[in-house]
Amino acid sequence: MINSRKTGAEYEKKAAQYLQTLGYEVIERNFRCRQGEIDLIAKDGEYLVFIEVKYRKDARLGEPLEAVDYRKRRRISETASYYCFSHGISQQQPCRFDAVAFVQGEWTVVRDAFDYFG
């Protein structure tokens, strides 16, 4: 039996390492609060980036980024708002939402994967 939480944590760690090779500075992993969870939070230049990580062994179950649906985007947005509020981050801070997927041995990074759902 596969432990999906353990597998997810493994790929989040690998995603963080991969993003660092692209110049991201990962500042937090698995931020959790009542509103939800954000897999990775990073700085990329002037941007504070909230990152959803998705993994699929293969594409038979669909593309991993398709799993970042309306409900998931809304929950990530609410969690990001709470993160900024609780960490005293200015509303002027430019933020974006990225998604990272790992399928069949390849990483895909989608910058600005979705807009904030306020």
Image (spheres, helix red, strand yellow):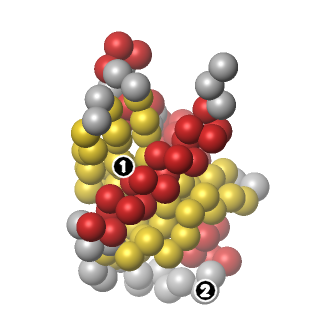
Name the residue carrying label 2.
88
Circle number at residue 99? 1
Figure label count: 2
Give the image quarter of residue 21. Answer: bottom left
Q: Is residue 23 above or below residue 104?
A: below
Is 95 on the left-hand or right-hand side of 34?
A: left
Classify mark 2: helix, strand or loop. Answer: loop
Q: Which residue: 75% across, 55% down?
A: 34
- The quarter of the image holding the N terminus is top right
**Does the rendering let one see residue 116?**
no
The spot of residue 10 in percent (x, y) is 53, 47
Give the image quarter of residue 104. Answer: top left
The spot of residue 12 in percent (x, y) is 49, 51
**Does the rendering let one see residue 73?**
yes
Q: Amino acid at mark 1?
A: Ala
Q: Amino acid at mark 2?
A: Gly
